[in-house]
Image (tube, rainbow, N blue to C red):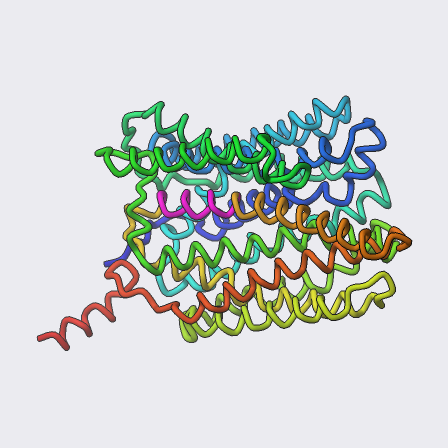
Amino acid sequence: MSTQIQVKNPKTMAFILMLGAFAGLFGETALNMALSNIMEQFSVPAATAQWLTTGYLLVLAILVPISALLMKWFTTRQLVIGGLTISLAGAILAALNISFSVLLLGRVVQAIGTGLLLPVMLSVMLLIFPIQKRGVVMGLMGLVITLAPALGPTLSGVIISTLSWPYIFWFSAIAYVLLILVAVVKIENVSEITKPKIDVSSILLSTIGFGGLIFALSKMAEVAISSPKVWAPLVVGIIALLSFGIRQNKMAQPMVNLSVFKYPMFTLGTLTMFLGILIILSTGILLPLYLKGSLLFSAAMAGLLLLPGNAVNFILAPIVGALFDKIGARRFTIAGFIFVLIGNIVFLSTISSQTPAWQIVVPFMILFFGLSMVMMPAQTNAMNQLPRELYGDGSAAMNTLNQVAGAAGTAIAITVFTSGQNSYVMDFPNATQPEILAAGIKYAFYFITGISVVGLIGSFFVKRPSTVTEKSPAVIQKAEAVSR
């Protein structure tokens, strides 16, 4: 049977949702190039400045699972317009450049808006387009998910060099205003309002669980894992998440229906997305540091050197989407992770303080060539196995873990990078700062390479899901005829 809901302007709705999500996900990494400027302007240390990124991811991870509940209480129009309006308020607060506290508050508010938009985007896309067009649509959505955080350092580097960092938020604000104006006219309601009972305990457990986990991961970059600042929130977070899971399974109307993880291809697809986002966010914070601090490029030039990799993703993602239904997820994810692994191996063999720029540009292009073949097929294959009534829960679960992956990737990459620098200084006490930084970056890429290997192994277990909800009527009729 068909799961499509008829709307007047499905393409326009898709455009609004994708562009809103793009602006929000772009915000995850947009300040990576500006952190040194912000530290100098507001006289804050690196550990404090990093909260502009970590705090953003923390709010997303807390809010996204709650959004599964919100989608059952509020209409699509209310959530989309509300999310865009809140994002606009956050962007304006950050752009005003009053103080570091106001900047951080603006980031938090903007993250709340993004946290509302992301799950709605995925759920609505699955409802307003027919199954035979899902590959192309999910290809474009995969492009948004991968391109936005990857493009953050590139665009922000150019903006910082030509204008100043607050313009990152002014441009975002303009985009949000235009999107709100179009959304008021074009967004239609497609979600089913059931208004389930609000379980305060579930909200608290989810907030403490994901908040504790991401806080602990962010602190790993500053202090040892043996420090109470790391293990205490980590233990509390894990206990809260386990309690959250147990409570959801016992509830008649859970906040997030964890039965989505009983579908093996959904679970594997979500894990694949987790690893892909982890790689994207790790490289997204490491390469700008390397290009600026070791190879001594300007912010604009560092951003432009990352542009070819983003261009590969931009070109390839829609093509992968168009070919998805013919080729399937398995072949794409296997080939994709092979390219990701090759890109990382090249990075490991070339990174130094004297590396020519082209030897960074080429493996980055190879990396994103592979990621373009991984992200959309993994996400589409995962969601295709779920029945329609679980789209919202599956979307919330997947997006939550994506935000955890982003925070984990950022925190672990910086932790391994710092450890690599310290080891290099012990072995070579007279090394220059660019050499030390390059050694730390190279050390961190061993971690990213290991993640690529895990992803490649997992890709061999991918299968095409075979649930009734993902079959077209013609396929169902053919199956019935064969069974007779």
Residue ID at (36%, 37%): 242
Q: Where residue 71 sits: x, y (%)?
A: 38, 35
Q: Is residue 113 visible?
A: no
Decide which of 265, 111 is in the foreground and name it: 265
Residue 28 lies within the magenta run: no
Q: Where residue 434 sits: x, y (%)?
A: 86, 54
Decide which of 330, 11 is in the foreground and name it: 330
Q: 8 above or below 108?
A: below
Residue ID at (38%, 38%): 189
Residue ID at (62%, 58%): 447
272 relative to 180 in the view: left or right: left
199 relative to 56 in the view: left or right: left
Q: Find residue 317 and report its image quarter.
A: bottom right
Decide which of 316, 46 is in the foreground and name it: 46
Q: Where's the C terminus, which quadrant?
A: bottom left
From this viewpoint, which residue is outermost toward the front? Answer: 427
Judged by its main secondary structure, the magenta piece is helix
Decide which of 228, 255 is in the foreground and name it: 228
Residue 393 lies within the magenta run: yes
Total numbered labels placed on residues in the image = 0
40 relative to 363 in the view: left or right: right
Q: Where residue 51 sits: x, y (%)?
A: 66, 33
Q: 20 above or below 362?
A: above
Q: Where's the N terminus, which quadrant?
A: bottom left
Q: Find residue 223 and report its image quarter.
A: top right
Magenta region: 392-403
Q: Where residue 185 sits: x, y (%)?
A: 49, 37
Q: Is residue 99 visible?
A: yes
From this viewpoint, which residue is outermost toward the left? Answer: 484
